[in-house]
Amino acid sequence: MCGFEQNASGIAELHVRGDPVCLVPAELFAADEPVDQRNSGRPFYFTYVLRNSDAEAWRLRRSYYGCRYAQLMGGAPRGGANPSGRP
């Protein structure tokens, strides 16, 4: 989970390798639940399937979404907890 301290809008860029990743933006979240997208009207997420096992940079194109939080599914932040051994 990544928190931006306030609502923000912009274009995310991830540096990833390994499994496909899914980025889920939201304005709300609770510590014991996934992000809360009730205000968006429908589930909204960005999925990226990597081309190979090498590191890749991925930037959203043709899309724009404001949020306060973003949940990364299918990956682990560099230097963060990684109990599943993800790249």
Image: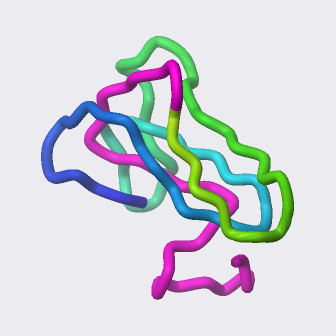
Q: Is residue 4 above or below residue 38?
A: below
* Number of marks in picture: 0
Q: Hey, which residue is sitting farthest top in the picture?
A: 41
Residue lying at 41% horizontally and 18% vertically, measured from the top left: 40
Q: Identify the residue shown where x is 68% and y is 53%.
A: 21
Q: By what rule are the colours in the image chosen?
A: rainbow
Instruction: Tell which of 37 and 45 is nearer to you.
Output: 45
Query: Which quadrant of the structure image shows residue 12?
Result: top left
Nearer to me, 54 or 49 = 54
Q: Return the residue found at the far left.
A: 6
Q: Is residue 44 magenta?
A: no
Q: Which residue is at a point 66% across and 86% down the rendered structure image?
A: 83
What range is drawn magenta here?
61-87
Tell me which corner region of the image, top left, top right, bottom left or bottom right, holds residue 26: top left
Residue occupying image coordinates x 42% and y 60%: 1
Left or right of residue 25: residue 86: right
Q: Position of residue 6 (x, y in %)?
A: 14, 43
Query: Quadrant of the image for the C terminus?
Result: bottom right
Q: Position of residue 10 (x, y in %)?
A: 30, 34
Viewer-closest of 75 and 38: 75
How far across and how far down the image is residue 78, in percent? 50, 80
- The image shows residue 11 at horizontal and vertical percentages of 38, 36
Secondary structure, magenta segment, majority class: loop
Q: Is residue 77 magenta?
A: yes
Q: Is residue 82 left or right of residue 65?
A: right
Q: Is residue 69 left or right of residue 74?
A: left
Q: Quadrant of residue 76?
A: bottom right
